[in-house]
């Protein structure tokens, strides 16, 4: 689970941050010390998707959207109604348009 933190994200200790170019439109950030996944960042908009577990206070978070719903295991059942997006629909939103 992740939180869209937008483009205005700042990090302390940049010397401990490693960025992996994971696709044409996104990259992932990791801690060089412990290996923790810190974010998934869209290159064009610079929006940061950050794991929920990084936040001490999760009380204001609302689970609104599930992605890759077409790949979810049958035993995943959440009680609240969410926007459900397939992998194809998600990639269509973020992948660069090809000529």
Image (tube, rainbow, N blue to C red):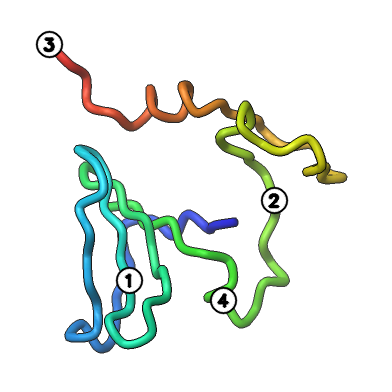
Gap in angstroms between the C-alphas marked 4 and 1:
16 Å
Residue depicted at 63% across the width and 39% down the height: 66
Residue depicted at 21% across the width and 42% down the height: 44
Q: Which mark is residue 63?
A: 2
* Secondary structure under the numbered disc 3 in the rendered image: loop
Q: Which mark is residue 99?
A: 3
* Secondary structure under the numbered disc 1 in the rendered image: strand
Gap in angstroms between the C-alphas marked 2 and 3:
36 Å
Q: Is residue 96 above or below residue 36?
A: above
Closer to the camera: disc 4 or disc 1? 1
For marks 4 and 1, the one nearer the N-term is: 1
Gap in angstroms between the C-alphas marked 4 and 2:
15 Å
The quarter of the rendered structure image containing the N terminus is bottom right
Gap in angstroms between the C-alphas marked 3 and 4:
40 Å
Gap in angstroms between the C-alphas marked 2 and 1:
24 Å
Please rate how many residues cluster around mark 1, counting C-alpha atoms within 10 Å: few if below 14, some from 14 to 19, many from 20. some
Q: Nearer the viewer, residue 41 or 75?
A: 75
Residue depicted at 38% across the width and 56% down the height: 6
For marks 2 and 3, the one nearer the N-term is: 2
Label 4 close to label 1 by CB (< 8 Å): no
Q: Nearer the viewer, residue 24 or 13?
A: 24
The quarter of the rendered structure image containing the C terminus is top left
Q: Is residue 84 above or below residue 29?
A: above
Residue position for label 4: 55
Q: Is residue 5 left or right of residue 85?
A: left
* Secondary structure under the numbered disc 4 in the rendered image: loop
For marks 4 and 2, the one nearer the N-term is: 4
Residue position for label 1: 30
* Secondary structure under the numbered disc 2 in the rendered image: loop
- Which picture quadrant has residue 49? bottom left
Closer to the camera: disc 3 or disc 4? 3
């Amino acid at each position: 689970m992740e939180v869209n933190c937008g483009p205005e994200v700042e990090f302390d200790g940049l010397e401990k941050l490693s960025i992996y170019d994971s696709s044409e439109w996104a990259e992932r950030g990791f801690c060089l010390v412990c290996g923790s996944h810190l974010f998934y960042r869209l290159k064009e908009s610079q929006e940061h998707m950050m794991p929920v577990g990084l936040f001490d206070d999760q009380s204001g978070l609302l689970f609104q959207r599930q992605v890759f719903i077409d790949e979810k295991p049958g035993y995943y059942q959440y009680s609240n109604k969410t926007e459900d997006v397939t992998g194809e629909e998600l990639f269509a939103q973020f992948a660069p348009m090809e000529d």
